[in-house]
Amino acid sequence: MTRRDNILLNIDWFTVFLWVALVVFGWMNIYSANIMKGDGTVMDFSQRYGKQFIWLLVSIILILIIFLLDAKFFPFFAYLLYGITIVTLLAVLVFGKEINGAKSWFVIGGFQFQPSEFAKLFTALALARLLSSYGFVLKNFKSLVLAGSIILAPALLIMVQPDLGSMMVYFAFIFVLYREGFPQNLMVLGSILIILFVITLLVEKIYILPVIWIIALIVIKLFKVPLKSVLYIFAAGILPAGILVFFMQSGQQVMGYESVILISIAASLLFALIIAIRLRNNNLYKIIAGMVISILFVISVDYAINNTLKEHQKQRIYVTLGIEDDPQGVGYNVNQSKIAIGSGGFSGKGFLNGTQTKLQFVPEQSTDFIFCTVGEEWGFIGASAVVILFVLMIVRLVILSERQRSDFSRIYGYGFISVLIVHFTVNVGMTIGLFPVIGIPLPFFSYGGSSLLAFTLFLFIFLKLDSNRKELLR
Amino acid sequence: MKYFDNRKYVFIAIAIIIGLVFITKLFLLQVVERSYKVSAENNSQRHVVTYPSRGLIYDRNGELLVSNQAAYDVMVSPVNVSEFDTTEFCSLLGIGRDNFLERLNRAKNYSWRINSVFMKQVEFKIAAVLHEKMYKFPGFTLQSRPLRTYPRPIASHVLGYIGEVNEKNIQSDDYYSAGDYIGVIGIEKSYEEVLRGEKGLKVYLKDVHNRIIGPYEEGKYDMPVKVGRDIAISLDAEIQEYAETLMQPFIGSVVAIEPSSGEILTMVSAPTVNPNLLIGRNLGSTIKKLSADTLNPLFNRAVMAQYPPGSTFKTINALVGLQEGVITTETSYYCDYGFYYRGIHVGCHNHETPLDLIGGIQNSCNTYFCNVFRRIMENPGYENTEESFNHWRDHVTSFGFGEKLGLDFASELKGNIPTASYYDRYYSKGHWNFLTILSMAIGQGELLITPIQMANMTATIANRGYYITPHLIKKIDGQDHIDEEFVRRNFTTIDSSNFVPVVDGMDLAVNGGPGSTARIARIRDITVCGKTGTAENPHGEDHSIFIAFAPKDDPKIALAVYVENEGFGGTWAAPIASLVIEKYLTGEVKRTWLENYVRNGNTNDEETEE
Ligand SMILES: [Zn+2]
């Protein structure tokens, strides 16, 4: 059981190599994005590449510290660290500085620190601790609520900032639950809720609710419920709607259209419930439950958007999702980014040879849009290489996670994999114009100390756990 | 417990599919698609931002108040700077080589690639020469900037000024980038989005020698520039200038409103500033200098100064008394040089006695209004003083006091109408009565009202019961622009009929016999209604106040005049108001003696003080 002396041998050097490759290549691109040929030194700490260099050194120190700690440290302190994270996220809402419309930064001295970057890591730790605890079964209701709360608490606090991009990353943890045996049905419900969330932002809810109802009717039919029953359920909804609308047309403004729709749907559901009881149809119960949850979800999201957010915060969310056109801002950046990447051609213009002026309209050039510097200077070859590095890292981490003997380590590993997939997909996707612009950084690559440190810690805690895997016998 | 290990393949599949999709898209973007592909000569684009000209500002009669003149910033993008004749460049700009390097380094520290300001607002002559020689100085460009100019040096507090955007502006609005200009205060600020227009962008293709060879992608990514829209504001330049001249010897404010529309005709805050000083690269130092001035010329007294309204407020107490039914027009009181009650004494001047309501306003009798106030506060219809007070307060605030009026003009202040809970805190609940707050009977005490609120009150009296929120905007782009907010009649809680005796009292205050307090404001053939006031000033001499509107039966102008530290309202404020009315209604001033009296105001005053 004592293999501590072999720790160096037990480290997965292939993943470390991938990390080094990404971090070094990332730094080179930050350097290139901020400097002209042959001028300035690496040690110019007033420039971004200088600052990022310091963060790199700090990362290495942190890695050493992680490897000096006992592996038991992480599961043991998971909840405590998570608690501190929640307190920090609350504190940033009060004491934080608003930058680019979101209150998500602490400014201490000359340094800016973004707690939401670290929150993902500690959420993954806490989730791993919970899911691996003795006797925990994902299927029962109480466990699901617990797991859901651990994920949602930081997500909601980040939404309030509002930093919708970082908030959406928390949906990634659904993948973790999936791996750990999250019921297929709930997975479907989860996906529906994500789709509904986006649709609610796009469309008025008086249009969404009837559509949900009609889709539910179709699904009911697909599950082999007799056509006659489906028609009854349909009529139970249409009749009250017709009567109420008739009254309203004749000038009696009893209620709004929204209430009419809700009353009709409720009547229809009640009828469906009666039929479900008579037919003893389990699927019908599930569909009714799913529909009730969907409708409540739409109403509460709609309420949250309209009543709790300020005008400029709403604006920011709409622009983020590409609902509202912002020709000077977001949409324009993507166009510029595509032009930059496209101009790189097959082999690129070479390191530091990016065409000088064209990027002056991409303000997030070294943060969220760093990938377009890669595309321009290193061409298709360089850009594909980065994509391959990320894919390799994800696949390698899946293999590593699966070889863990401890549930905690495996679940934590999947936490990292899920977050990494979402960040990589969304960031590169937006840069090349496949996704709407959601401002989240490219892991290990983008400029920014918080992001680099958080992702490095995230990865190396896993590598530490992995290097200790043999100490735990089954 | 690897019950679900086959789900690991889903993860691997997702990663590989995403990787393939991305690589395919990159291949399309970088290798296949011709439009993004850039030829081997390393062509690239140059972005040229076109700045729209800022909208002009006219007065109500179409007279130009604010226009633009050309000004140029020299911009630099350090990455494009290569060997050139710095001696010629430096001598053109009139700077030394050290200064040149310092400026270039500053630009480099800001950004290598992004254009930043090398030298601000070079003179037009130099810019013209530079323009022709610019090709010799790679990396440098000329950027035109809006620079305002004011044909008439008036109304600087209303117009405001433009200045360079600060970090906060840039962060809160994506439209702005460093070096842009924005309305900082006044009309320039409140109508910024109308006036500024929209920046345009042209994308050009350039060759290795940095020469433009044509539009990029046939101008697909160009954005047209939209020029700023012109606006007309409700000020009357003639009257504004005249009122500013009259206020020259004084500190204070004149605000005139057209009662029927709520349009602000004149808004003076003295001392004034010449708006032509608030432009160009010396803006910063001018602001600094003016801020240090003890008379605080940048402070817009018309909307920010809060004074007690003095005796002008007797009109409001009269209206409340009538509305609450505690007095009638016939209610009369004896006045023996003041009001005496349980050891409290409020003095009054010599006048005929007894007086009814109209006489009370005409003579501004303190005794009369202390009695009216007592009746209001001891209203037998209500349970206690507090309830009476709350009714009084509701009436008073319906005139727009104690809250911002909601002008289309930044930096307005609220003034103050105290609440019952304020007195509860000071004297504890149930331990205060009309006597405690008696000073408000004659418009003193805790009451604070801004000149614009006072002018609005006068317009309300002129309209016999309602006001339209005062505003400055008249037209946008030649079209009548009337925001819903600026046409709605805001009715007070006072019935229209109750205004009749109050207006009659204000008529007699100007046009009545001996004892009338504002006879100096009288104008031949025009019935001016007015009321004098004196605001107690704990820090020095009292302030002189006069409110007036005219003509009595079809009011065209309502105004409030404040003159600081000049004592009784009849002395200076009334003649100033009267002259402004005469000028506005007849187009000329025949009473040159009165004009001279006002213009020499300061010297007269100094003599009396000595
Ligand atoms: Zn008297």
Image (spheres, rainbow, N blue to C red):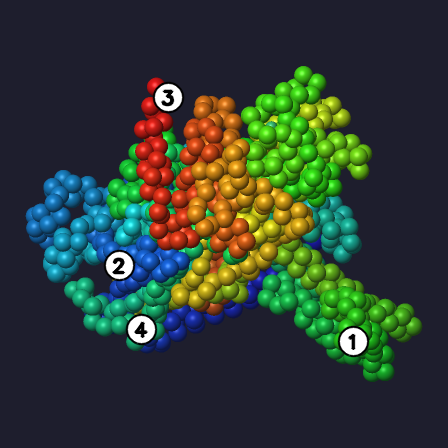
A325 lies left or right of A175:
left
Vertical comparison of A72 with A279: above or below: above
Q: CA distance from mark 4 to mark 1?
A: 56 Å
Q: Residue at x 43, y 69 (%)?
A: B23
Residue marked by disc 4:
B219
The chain containing the residue under callout 1 comes to A
Q: Observer-nearest residue: B140 or B422?
A: B422
Residue marked by disc 3:
B609
Q: Secondary structure at mark 4?
A: helix
> Closer to the observer: label 4 or label 2?
4
Q: CA distance from mark 4 to mark 3?
A: 73 Å
Q: Do marks 1 and 2 share a chain?
A: yes
Q: What amino acid is at disc 1?
A: Ser
Q: Do marks 2 and 3 share a chain?
A: no
The quadrant holding residue A181 is bottom right
Vertical comparison of A241 with B476: above or below: below
> Closer to the observer: label 4 or label 3?
3
**Is residue A252 among what the camera can see?**
yes
Residue marked by disc 2:
A356
**Is residue A382 among what the camera can see?**
no
Q: Do marks 3 and 1 share a chain?
A: no
> Closer to the observer: label 2 or label 3?
3
The extreme right residue here reads: A278
In the rendered view of the protein, which quadrant contains the N terminus of chain A?
top right
Q: What amino acid is at disc 4?
A: Gly
Q: Residue at x 21, y 56 (%)?
A: B142
Q: Do marks 4 and 1 share a chain?
A: no
Residue A13, image x, y percentages: 46, 49
Residue A250: image tag? 1
Q: Residue at x 80, y 34 (%)?
A: B380
